[in-house]
Image: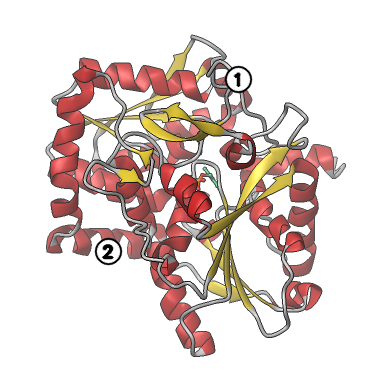
Amino acid sequence: MSTSFQPDERGFYGPFGGAYIPEMLIPNIENLRNNYLRIINSESFRKDFKNLLEDYAGRPSPLYHAGRLSEHYGCNIWLKREDLNHTGSHKINNTIGQILLANEMGKKRIIAETGAGQHGVATATVCALMGLDCIVYMGETDMERQAPNVARMKMLGADVRPAMSGSRTLKDATNEALRDWIANPLDTFYLIGSVVGPHPYPDLVARLQSVISGEIQWQMRNKTGNSNPDYVVACVGGGSNAAGSFYHFLNEPDVKLIGAEASGEGLTSGKTAASIAMGETGVIHGSMTYLMQTDDGQITEPYSISAGLDYPGIGPLHSWLSKTGRAKYLSVTDQEALDAALLLTRKEGIIPALESAHALAALDQLELKSEENVVVTVSGRGDKDMKTYMERFNLK
Ligand SMILES: *Cc1c(COP(=O)(O)O)cnc(C)c1O
């Protein structure tokens, strides 16, 4: 099969992707589209990106052979430890890359939207690092639910602005950020947090996060003599840690790619965030993709115990990987994720983020053989989820 997993020049992966944007945003998007590849492939960008990833974020992140978890599953499990990065997840890889790009494009003012606050914190962090103005839009409801992350952003110097319309959550914050960008086209850079949004963002973010699979290749080669594992497993919210974990393996058909999406309380419970299992094709945040919607095309409110997976759509690359069969997407309930989080904690002494626990729980749905090598990306650490763990595991 000669399917390309790169977008065409209009940003389409098969029927998915593109740039469905208001006319007033076209100059901004064209400016980005015309410059991003030249800049991120330049010698100076690559050097600055590499240096900051190493000395500021702490890369390379280890690829850890999880001995007791391997014994439990009867195969070799390797954990890609994105939880050990500065600010606690893979999100810093993308924000470092985009802030360098913004700098190179002469932008002085950074805007972002955030749901759980993780991307907002990673953005506020790199803005402090570079001395740039940072405005983060966040739904008012989310600001209440995620107060510690709001405090972090404010301490880092960000201006956190509540989005007061609609359900006052992520999609409303996204609308506010887009409105801001339309009003301030010249000096402002919109720093998107996942492989979503209009072209070129899905491709840009996938390329920046591909540092994950680039490292997995040489780490696997050093540890096993073969750079290709049998499986790569990652959780999928918008899909950036999964895109980064899959990237260098997309054209390696012997590597099975598995995404884990959140089914919340169950696929048919009405409380779910499984966009691939339950979604239909439609436009969200400027791109054509699978998204959860009502019969008349209204986007439905997603639900997952994990704030980072609580998104009604999915990046267009993943819709394409699913449609072509190149990657398989499994759904994992809240309870299965909680069980997997406790299992990893007790077997390995690693408390994962709830998002990452969905990837770990997907192992239960695979038929694993004893000689197989399975890489699971631990996208983040569990500190931010301790309130949920305290309630659900009765730790008070
Ligand atoms: C935000 C987040 C996710 C979900 O985002 P993707 O773009 O799907 O990777 C997953 N894990 C952690 C720890 C996060 O903070």
Q: Earlier in the sequence, mark 2 or mark 1?
A: 2
| In the foreground, 122 or 77 | 77
Toward which corner of the image does residue 160 lie, by quadrant? Answer: top left
> How far from the left and from the top, in percent, is residue 223?
52, 86
Q: Is residue 123 left or right of residue 118?
A: left
Q: Which mark is residue 294?
A: 1
Which residue is located at x 49 percent, y 78 percent? 228
Element marked by disc 1: loop
Which residue is located at x 67 percent, y 46 percent? 354
Q: Is residue 86 left or right of residue 147?
A: left
Q: Which mark is residue 51?
A: 2
Which residue is located at x 46 percent, y 28 percent? 282
Looking at mark 2, is its residue's CB closer than 8 Å to ligand 1? no
Query: From this viewpoint, which residue is outermost toward the top?
Result: 165
> How far from the left and from the top, in percent, is residue 192?
36, 37
Q: Identify the amino acid type marked 1.
A: Thr
Q: Is residue 185 visible?
A: yes
| In the foreground, 245 or 162 | 245
Q: Is residue 30 above or below residue 243?
A: above
State the CA–CA distance, disc 2 to disc 1.
46 Å
Q: Is residue 375 above or below residue 218?
A: above
Q: Is residue 387 above or below residue 242?
A: above
> How far from the left and from the top, in percent, is residue 384?
62, 42
Q: Is residue 90 visible?
A: no
Dot in front, 2 or 1: 1
| In the foreground, 232 or 20 | 20
Q: Identify the amino acid type marked 2.
A: Asn
Element marked by disc 2: helix
Callout 1 crowding tier (Cα within 10 Å): few <14, some 14–19, many ≥20: few
Q: Is residue 341 left or right of residue 183?
A: right
> How far from the left and from the top, in percent, is residue 118?
50, 39
Looking at mark 1, is its residue's CB closer than 8 Å to ligand 1? no
